[in-house]
Amino acid sequence: MLRLDNIKNYKQYYFEHVERYHNLFDFKNIWNKQVGKLSGGEEKLLFFSIISSMEKKWYIFDEPFASVDKTNREIIIEIMKGLIEKERNIIITSHMDEFLISFEEVHIISLEECL
């Protein structure tokens, strides 16, 4: 995914990004596993952390907390907070709402409002 974004030295680029979260998860262990051998939560965390490493103004995450355990959910929230600190915008689709208390400002659009 990083190569598709024209990032040349993608491994170094990714490691520099997740280094700030090294106390939260062992990204090198996840990186070194074959994708097919990752648990569902590890796979989601790996892809989430790769996408969040890309320098974009907007991020859209579809059900980022589905099938993710509490520990990985907390890591994803911390990475999202890091994006917000960098003045990035995030759109999240989710059936879960307990993560909402983790953020200072949240705008909710419910399906009922759209009908």
Image (cartoon, helix red, strand yellow):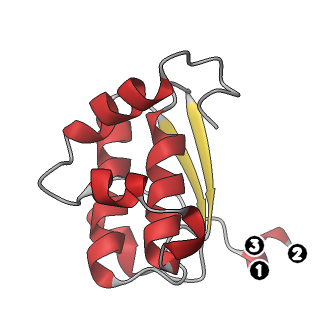
Alpha-carbon distance for marks 1 and 2?
Answer: 5 Å
Q: Are marks 3 and 2 in contact (CB under 8 Å)?
A: yes
| Whole-percent x, y for residue 9 in the image | 48, 19
User: Is 104 situated above or below 112?
Assistant: above
| Whole-percent x, y for residue 27 in the image | 30, 53
Q: Please give the label number shown on residue 113.
A: 3
Q: Secondary structure at mark 2?
A: loop
Q: Secondary structure at mark 3?
A: helix
Query: Does the image show residue 1?
Result: yes
Closer to us: 32 or 4: 32
Q: Quadrant of the N terminus?
A: top right
Residue in the image at 52% along x and 84% along y: 67
- Quadrant for residue 25, please give it: bottom left
Q: Secondary structure at mark 1?
A: helix
Q: Are marks 1 and 3 in contact (CB under 8 Å)?
A: yes
The residue pinned by badge 2 equals 115
Q: Amino acid at mark 3?
A: Glu
Alpha-carbon distance for marks 3 and 2?
Answer: 6 Å
Residue in the image at 76% along x and 80% along y: 112
Q: Count residues near mark 1 (Cα–Cα under 10 Å), then give few for <14, some for 14-19, many for 20+.
A: few
Closer to us: 57 or 40: 40
Q: Please give the label number shown on residue 112.
A: 1
Q: Amino acid at mark 1?
A: Glu
| Whole-percent x, y for residue 21 in the image | 21, 47
Residue in the image at 88% along x and 75% along y: 115
**Of all residues shown, which one is farthest toward the left?**
23
Q: Is 100 left or right of 109, judged from the image as shown?
A: left
- Quadrant for residue 45, please give it: bottom left
User: Is 94 situated above or below 104?
Assistant: below
Q: Count residues near mark 2 (Cα–Cα under 10 Å), then give few for <14, some for 14-19, many for 20+.
A: few
